[in-house]
Amino acid sequence: MQLHIRNVLAAALALLLVLSGLAGAQANEAVRFVIGGQFAFPEEGAFVIERMQEEGGAYTTVQLPQGRTLHVLDFKAYPGVRLVYGGTRVGMENAVQLSVLMATLPEGYRPDVVVHSGISGNAGPGLIGDIYLNRFFVLANLGTMHGYGFDPRLNEAYNPATGELDRIMYFPAHPKLIELGEAAFATYLDRPGVRELVSDIRPAGETLQLLTDFVGASSNWFVASSEVVERWQLLYGIRPRRSRATITYPGEAFYEEVGRTYPLGTVDMETAAAAKTFYEFGIPFAAARYPSDSARETAREEIEAYRLHAAEIGGRFVWEWILAVAEYVQSGGEFAPAAALSGQSLF
């Protein structure tokens, strides 16, 4: 049934591309690698779209169902590499919808890897404007509320590598995409305009940081509560298992598999839903999230004051990241399948 639905979607979108004239205008045979890109808010995608239009390659747009627009660039600098870029809109359901649409596009448009990005609340040690490339993502609004509190639940996630369902809570970022993001960040810091943007929101002169060893949590709630952040830090951070005499948090149960401590870094409303979707389609995925607020009581005021700055700081980084991926592919680099993950029952 799943394969049938996927084929129907792919056929419908292929017809849409033909009717739009795009399939005839651009020869898919020349495309050997597709980078998928996602952004949540229009302001977050504006910088990348502007650079796509200026890169010198073939740029066009494709209208998808539900009024969505895909921005498509065949790079001039990296022949055979294509970027397909679209906005999720706000919320988990919207992120799933775009992710399924992208994962079922016809060959030549369907992403080989996906880089996702957007502003976020800060639950880690970073500052507003810093950039997180989280190692894992968790759906924070999935669980059961009991009289004694909230228990997170594992997901049943389809693993295309095995054809079976995995019991999993944390969805992984692809390590090579994080590595390329780290290389891109070093280049990005020296680009004109970046330091000026940072100084606007950091008058004390704090250095912009790239933070990579964290978990990102997503839910349909805009979080503006110290109590929620502290609770989520306990629930979703990955740490060594504690004594049997104390409560075992989900991250503690998962620690033995990942073998490292990963605290909670960011909270947002889209990333984990996209991570889960691309995991189920077997498409390597990673996400850059850049805090526009503290996710605590002052979050509403902070996001109004800083979201546009954070969006441009992040957008400038994402463009460098995309270029790093394109250059890596052009030089013959490949993306090995991510290691399979499993979960442990919490009940």
Image (cartoon, rainbow, N blue to C red):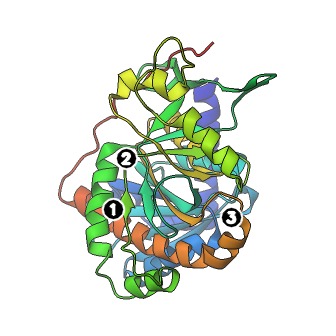
**SS category of the residue bearing label 2:** loop
Q: Secondary structure at mark 1?
A: strand
Q: Nearer the viewer, residue 77 or 15?
A: 77
Q: Residues within 10 Å of mark 1 (few under 14, many from 20)?
A: many
Residues at circles 2 and 3 in contact by the CB criterion of under 8 Å: no
Neighbourhood count class around disc 3 (C-alpha, 10 Å): few under 14, some 14–19, many 20 upward: some
Task: From the top left corner, tell me how far across and down residue 87 is, in percent.
Answer: 61, 62
**Label 3: which secondary element:** helix
Residue found at x 45% / y 76%: 52
Closest to the observer, 241 or 91: 241
Query: For residue 209, which quarter of the picture?
Result: bottom left
Tell me the amino acid under the disc marked 2. Asp
| Residue occupying the point 62% across, 51% down | 270
Q: Give the mark nearest the N terminus, 1 or 3.
A: 1
* C-alpha separation, residue under disc 2 versus residue under disc 3: 24 Å
Give the residue at mark 2: 213
The residue type indicated by label 3 comes to Ala
Viewer-nearest of labels 2 and 3? Answer: 3
Q: Nearer the viewer, mark 2 or mark 1?
A: 2
Within 10 Å of the Cα at label 2, are there few (<14), some (14-19), or many (20+) other Cα atoms?
Answer: some
Judged from this view, the residue extending furthest toward the front is 245
Query: At x 30% / y 66%, what residue is drawn?
Result: 184
Position of residue 184 in the picture relative to residue 99 (left or right): left
> Mark 1 sits on what residue?
81
Of 227 and 18, nearer the camera is 227
Give the percent coordinates (x, y) of residue 308: 60, 78
Q: Which residue is mark 3?
A: 299
Name the image quarter holding the N terminus: top right
Give the residue type at disc 1. Val
The residue at the point 40 percent across, 49 percent down is 113
- Quadrant of residue 194 in the image? bottom left
